[in-house]
Image (spheres, rainbow, N blue to C red):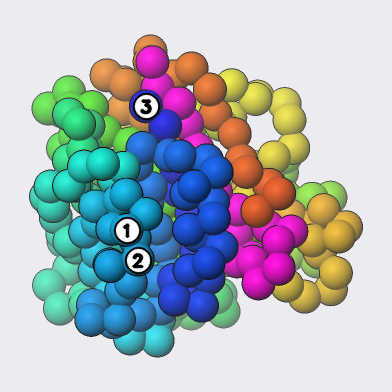
């Protein structure tokens, strides 16, 4: 079973890219982020024609998350992160697919920091950790997939000091990610590639893609029930180099 996460950065603008990747990679489940489309603008018909059922929560202009399932209908279990009534940003969705719960997470960026946006990021992380712990306590098979907007360690960002003040690499951001993982989650890519520089995001600015000046922001965390089934994990890096590409590439796992 192949499960992927992909920040598509505008699902309608990148629809040809998305459909081409689905045909080539044939993932069984896909968590999408940054749809940048309202519910009614989500290209459900085109995705269904490609062989995928979908659940989604859109938001006009910004955010938006979805879960696609190949030759299956994902069963929606939650379309927002609990713990903060009134938070209407479309950043979280989860669904059951073939006996596994899969999330699509679009964690707040947090810039500029310090400030309210960074505080919101840390609060969101705390809420995610509390919700994730309910999965751990129930011993459920779960993949926490998504764009976490955190490069967890120095090996997850190209050698540079230019990002030192960015929310993506702050000690508090990294500590929040580490605290989540310490509940018992397996960071799939890092588990299988402990010392390799692997990136999932290359900013459009400053020629960062041709220079391979990337960051690993997109993660798939496996619950203790699923971790023993981990067979492969990687990033479809070439997708970032295609015409009209998102600034992210799909990250994926294969479960036995």
Residue at 79 percent of width and 61 percent of height: 209
**In which quadrant of the rendered view does residue 34 lie?**
bottom left
Tell me the distance, in whole angstroms, between the alpha carbons under discs 1 and 3.
21 Å
Name which of mark 1 and mark 3 comes first in the sequence: 3
Cβ–Cβ under 8 Å for marks 2 and 1? yes
Tell me the distance, in whole angstroms, between the alpha carbons under discs 2 and 1.
5 Å
Any magenta on residue 107? no
Give me the disc on residue 46: 2
Residue 213 drawn above or below residue 235: below
Q: Is residue 171 left or right of residue 206?
A: left
Residue at 65 percent of width and 53 percent of height: 239
Question: Which residue is nearer to you in this view: 64 or 81?
Answer: 64
What residue did someone put label 1 on?
A: 49
In the rendered image, residue 93, in percent from the top left (x then y), is placed at 24, 57
Residue 53 drawn above or below residue 230: below
Q: Is residue 251 left or right of residue 83?
A: right
Residue at 44 percent of width and 71 percent of height: 11
Question: Which residue is nearer to you in this view: 68 or 23?
Answer: 23
- The range drawn in magenta is 240-256
Q: On the rendered image, what quadrant is the C terminus found in?
A: top left
Q: Which is closer to the viewer, label 2 or label 3?
A: 2
In the rendered image, residue 6, in percent from the top left (x then y), is placed at 48, 54
Local packing at callout 2 (Cα closer than 10 Å; few below 14, some 14-19, many 20+) is few
In the rendered image, residue 90, in percent from the top left (x then y), is placed at 28, 71
Local packing at callout 1 (Cα closer than 10 Å; few below 14, some 14-19, many 20+) is few
What residue did someone put label 3 on?
A: 1
Q: Is residue 10 left or right of residue 132?
A: right
């Amino acid at each position: 079973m192949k499960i992927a996460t992909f920040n598509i950065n505008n699902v309608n603008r990148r629809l040809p890219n998305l459909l081409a990747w689905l045909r080539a990679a044939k993932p069984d489940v896909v968590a999408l982020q940054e749809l940048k489309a309202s519910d009614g603008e989500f290209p459900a018909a085109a995705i269904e024609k490609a062989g995928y059922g979908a659940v989604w929560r859109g938001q006009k202009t910004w955010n938006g998350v979805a879960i696609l399932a190949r030759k299956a209908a994902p069963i929606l279990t939650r379309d927002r992160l609990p713990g903060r009534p009134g938070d209407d940003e479309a950043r979280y969705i989860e669904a059951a697919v073939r006996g596994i719960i899969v999330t699509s997470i679009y964690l707040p960026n947090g810039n500029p920091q310090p400030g309210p946006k960074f505080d919101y990021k840390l609060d969101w992380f705390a809420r995610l950790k509390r919700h994730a712990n309910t999965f751990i306590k129930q011993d459920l098979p779960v993949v926490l997939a998504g764009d976490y907007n955190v490069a967890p360690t120095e090996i997850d960002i190209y050698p540079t000091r230019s990002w030192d003040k960015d929310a993506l690499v702050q000690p508090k951001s990294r500590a929040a990610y580490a605290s989540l993982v310490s509940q018992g989650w397996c960071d799939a890519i890092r588990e299988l590639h402990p010392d390799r520089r692997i990136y999932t995001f290359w900013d459009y600015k400053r020629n960062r893609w041709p220079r391979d000046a990337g960051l690993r922001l997109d993660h798939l965390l496996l619950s203790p029930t699923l971790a023993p089934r981990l067979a492969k994990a990687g990033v479809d890096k070439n997708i970032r180099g295609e015409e009209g590409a998102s600034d992210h590439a799909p990250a994926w796992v294969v479960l036995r």
